Amino acid sequence: MKLGLAVLALVLARIAWGFFGSEPARFRAFVRRPREVAAYARELAFGRPPIHRSHNPLGGAMVVALLAVLLGLVATGAVAYAGPEFAGPLTGIVGKRTAHGVKEVHEALSGLLLGLIAAHVAGVVFSSWRERQNLVAGMITGWKRAPDAPAEPEPRQRRAWFTVRATAALVLGALAAATLALFLGFPVRVGAASPVASGLLREYEAQARRQRAGFGAFSAEEGRKLYFAEFVQEGQKVSCSSCHTANPRARGITPAGKIVEPLAPAANPDRLTDRGDVEKWFKRNCKQVMGRECTAEEKGHFVTFLLGA
């Protein structure tokens, strides 16, 4: 989630710079029609490619592709995080099938991004060789060779470019600070399982006594039985152990291939550290496995089992 925020901040900064930044960095300076991109590719491969003040047409197409894929990753990642398996804010709104479908798109975009990165690096190296100039140095200094440009920029140009770079640094610095603030704003709840779990058990006990007069106490053994109990859903037998394995301290895996962190707080300190997350988890998984919501007594047995696992 934090990496997603950082990516979003960087992408938004580049998009803003593409409209309000220096002239060579604006989209209108390097985004070309597909026909022009194809023509330049032929020249790059077989002829003498012309020098462009900004990105060449192939580089411009790569910029657009990278930004689009990164935005797609952020969007699908947010939806997947919010889906039923992740206890996010859209739990109960985004269906299981939808969340799984979005997750598959997210993973496909991840693979596509790796391919684009490899192609981009190879393209920079190849273009530098064919155009006989160091494009990487140009990215750092802001200067690159042009057919009819003077060897040295005028002093006024130097001042203007310094102002542009200073403005860019301030904008990116502000975005980085905002991202860092959001990054640090996500609560770290490691080690908080005991007090939160104790409070939950007290709540569940009070509810269980109201629901069933003969209720005595929570039992880890009853929780273990519930963990392995099988229920028929959509013609198949499922249980908590179907995804979380027979060992609640081990990582599990969903039918869609998503890795699930251990349920037991002894192996995963983040478990049982947030009351809202625990309630969402019960609401979602009880319905998926049992076809109904769990009773307070069942929740208490289950939490007791996990605490001792």
Image (spheres, rainbow, N blue to C red):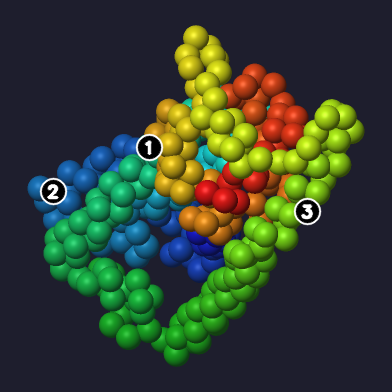
Q: Could you tell which of marks 3 and 1 lies nearer the N-terminus?
A: 1
Q: How many marks?
A: 3
Name the residue that disc number 2 marks: 45
Q: Position of residue 215 (x, y in %)?
A: 80, 33
Say which residue appears at 56% left-offset and 59% top-offset.
Answer: 269
Packing grade of label 1 (10 A; few <14, some 14-19, many >=20) is few
Name the residue that disc number 3 marks: 199
The label number, if any, that marks residue 14 in the structure image: none
Say which residue appears at 10% left-offset and 48% top-offset.
Answer: 46
Q: CA distance from mark 3 to mark 2?
A: 68 Å
Name the residue that disc number 1 marks: 108
* Residue at the far bottom in the pictured view: 155
Q: Position of residue 58 (x, y in %)?
A: 30, 49
Question: Which structural element holds mark 3?
Answer: helix
Question: In the image shown, does 35 or 258 lie closer to the viewer?
Answer: 258
Q: Position of residue 242 (x, y in %)?
A: 46, 29
Q: CA distance from mark 3 to mark 1?
A: 42 Å
179 displayed left or right of 92: left
Say which residue appears at 78% left-offset and 53% top-offset.
Answer: 199
Packing grade of label 3 (10 A; few <14, some 14-19, many >=20) is few
Question: Which structural element holds mark 2?
Answer: helix
Say which residue appears at 28% left-offset and 71% top-offset.
Answer: 136
